[in-house]
């Protein structure tokens, strides 16, 4: 078994969490091969070497960004016939751990979620998006969800924290997420964009746009829909022209699982959506961030096998 361990996940708390559970999860034995993200050989070399040796079971020990990091390296390097054999398991020692939600009590140890049943893995859709960067078209992938607007800007701040947020990330993750969300809400400005979805084009003043394969995001927040892991479609939630006070109320509703229909919302299920703007905007995907003026999302059906418990 190959383990990709990101010691910097969870605001730097990942290694302590890992040490609490790795032996009890039977993940520390003589046959285990470790890769420490950003420390030893590159992810490219590690993944390719493992695949060339016929190893296809990987455990991602980190947060959502670590899962995403591995996913993108894997898809970009593995041949289709090899990719179909790979199985991804995970231990959630990051901040939000949306990959593991909804949490199941049978798959939590020391308050740390895990999905390690390689015999009961299923094929999952993968989100893909194409954007322009430095005059070139770049493709990225995600398993959980993507966002544009206030949530994306909040994740951008979370990844590049001020001193207060940096301190909170080490002490209490939920407090850190709450602080980042509140600060970002009061600094966020809606922006004009063109959206094309289901052959329909229209203008929007984006407050938040969620493009999801999982309802959960940013700690306790949750969109009120139930996207399927392998139906070939995104659930898309668009909120437009919201004031700062209304954004606060929206986040309160999303944190309590309440209806969001009163928040100038539109909803679709689709396999493609394109967003363009005159100015650059942040795109968040599984906690990672890029900036662009135009991005096009699509679904790759049943691309990768993932442990579900």
Image (tube, rainbow, N blue to C red):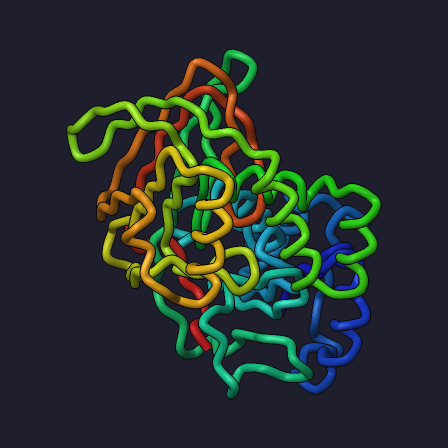
Instruction: Where is residue 64? Give x, y as percent.
Output: 57, 56
Q: Is 289 displayed left or right of 170 in the figure?
A: left
Eyeballing the image, is 271 above or below 35? above
Eyeballing the image, is 83 above or below 294? below
Question: How many numbered marks have been drawn onto this rendered protein structure?
Answer: 0
Instruction: Where is residue 238? Give x, y as percent.
Output: 33, 41
Q: Is 69 displayed left or right of 38 in the figure?
A: left
Instruction: Where is residue 114? Give x, y as percent.
Output: 57, 75
| Residue found at x 26% / y 43% | 266
Nearer to the camera, 65 or 260:
260
| Residue found at x 73% / y 78% | 28
Instruction: Where is residue 278? Give x, y as percent.
Output: 43, 13
Q: Is residue 246 visible to us here?
A: yes
Q: Is residue 86 visible to us here?
A: no
Locate the N terminus by quadrant. bottom right
| Residue found at x 40% / y 78% | 120
| Residue found at x 57% / y 42% | 185
């Amino acid at each position: 078994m190959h383990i990709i361990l990101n010691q910097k996940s969870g605001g730097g708390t990942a290694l302590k969490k890992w040490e609490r559970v790795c032996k009890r999860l039977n993940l520390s034995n003589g046959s285990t091969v470790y890769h420490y993200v950003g420390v030893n050989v590159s992810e490219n070399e590690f993944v390719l070497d493992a695949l060339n040796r016929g190893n296809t079971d990987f455990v991602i020990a980190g947060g959502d960004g670590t899962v995403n990091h591995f996913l993108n390296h894997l898809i970009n390097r593995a041949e289709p016939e090899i990719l179909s054999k790979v199985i991804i398991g995970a231990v959630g020692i990051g901040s939000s751990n949306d990959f593991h939600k909804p949490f199941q009590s049978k798959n939590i140890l020391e308050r740390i979620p895990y999905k390690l049943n390689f015999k009961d893995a299923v094929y999952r859709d993968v989100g893909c998006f194409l954007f322009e960067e430095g005059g070139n078209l770049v493709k990225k992938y995600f398993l959980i969800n993507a966002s544009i607007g206030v949530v994306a800007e909040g994740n951008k701040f979370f990844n590049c924290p001020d001193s207060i947020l940096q301190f909170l990330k080490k002490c209490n993750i939920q407090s850190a997420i709450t602080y980042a969300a509140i600060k970002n809400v009061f600094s966020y400005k809606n922006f004009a964009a063109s959206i094309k979805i289901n052959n329909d084009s229209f203008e929007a003043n984006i407050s938040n746009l969620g493009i999801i394969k999982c309802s959960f995001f940013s700690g306790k927040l949750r969109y009120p829909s139930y996207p399927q892991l392998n139906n070939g479609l995104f659930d898309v939630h668009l909120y437009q022209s919201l004031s700062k006070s209304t954004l606060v109320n929206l986040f309160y509703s999303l944190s309590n699982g309440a209806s969001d229909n009163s928040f100038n919302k539109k909803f679709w299920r689709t396999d493609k959506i394109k967003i363009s703007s005159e100015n650059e905007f942040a795109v968040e995907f599984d906690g990672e961030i890029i900036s662009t003026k135009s991005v096009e999302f699509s679904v790759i059906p049943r691309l990768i096998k993932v442990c579900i418990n």
